[in-house]
């Protein structure tokens, strides 16, 4: 890991009435739009869906690091994230984020240790730690 602080660059570009192109040096651009809940079109990424995607992505990346550090073998993970957007004290923000982590592990894995490490993953994710919302973790561990 590089010494902190780290810096990340992104750019958004649009014209009136057009979708927004979000880019970052060396990465493919994304096209985004206002979410349908705010009158935007269906089928496009929005800042809200990108944020929930970042939470899910960060959870898995954090899990990878924690599992590797603890010598945990695993087969597959899926994380579904639902964010609740609400208005609190005249500010619209995410107030609750539910993360559902589905983990597939080899037969005979130590479930107590896995649950402990999944909880540690939730509290270690830098994206989640950067948000002012209640976080709820639901887990399902399956042996394969």
Image (cartoon, rainbow, N blue to C red):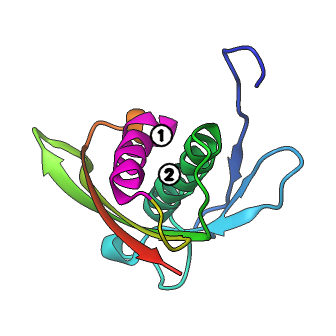
Relative to 25, is 61 on the left or the right? Answer: left
In terms of image quadrants, where is residue 44?
A: bottom right
**Residue 104: x and y, percent?**
51, 73
Magenta residues span 110-127
**Residue 106: x and y, percent?**
56, 71
The quadrant of the rendering that contains the N terminus is top right
Picture residue at 59% right of the left edge, 71% below the top: 76
Q: Which residue is mark 2?
A: 59
> Earlier along the polypeptide chain: callout 2 or callout 1?
2
Does the magenta-highlighted stretch encompass residue 124? yes
Answer above or below: position of 124 versus 27: above
Q: CA distance from mark 2 to mark 1?
A: 6 Å
Q: Nearer the viewer, residue 106 or 64?
A: 106
For label 1, count other residues whose C-alpha is less than 10 Å away and answer few (under 14), some (14-19) or many (20+): some
Picture residue at 67% right of the left edge, 61% below the top: 15
Answer above or below: position of 44 versus 83: below
Does the magenta-highlighted stretch encompass residue 17? no
Residue occupying the far bottom of the picture: 42
Residue occupying the far left of the picture: 89
Answer above or below: position of 50 versus 132: below
Picture residue at 54% right of the left edge, 49% below the top: 63
Numbered circle sitting on residue 55? none
Q: Nearer the viewer, residue 141 or 1?
A: 141
For label 2, count other residues whose C-alpha is less than 10 Å away and answer few (under 14), some (14-19) or many (20+): many
What secondary structure prevails in the magenta region? Answer: helix
Quick one: SS at disc 2? helix
**Residue 141: x and y, percent?**
39, 70
Q: Which residue is mark 1?
A: 125
Relative to 56, is 94 on the left or the right? Answer: left
Q: Nearer the viewer, residue 67 or 60?
A: 67
Quick one: SS at disc 1? loop
**Residue 50: x and y, percent?**
53, 59
């Amino acid at each position: 890991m590089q010494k902190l602080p780290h810096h990340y660059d992104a750019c958004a570009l649009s014209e009136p009435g057009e979708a927004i192109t979000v880019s970052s040096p060396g990465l493919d651009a994304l096209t985004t739009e206002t979410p349908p809940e705010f009158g935007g079109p269906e089928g496009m990424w929005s800042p809200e869906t990108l944020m929930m995607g970042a939470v899910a992505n960060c959870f898995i990346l954090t899990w990878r690091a924690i599992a590797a550090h603890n010598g945990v073998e695993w087969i597959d993970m899926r994380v579904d994230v639902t964010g609740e957007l609400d208005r609190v004290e005249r500010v619209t923000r995410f107030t609750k984020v539910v993360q559902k982590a589905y983990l597939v592990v080899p037969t005979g894995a130590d479930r107590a240790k896995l649950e402990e490490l999944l909880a540690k993953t939730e509290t270690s994710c830098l994206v989640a730690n950067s948000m002012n919302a209640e976080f709820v973790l639901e887990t399902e561990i399956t042996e394969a």
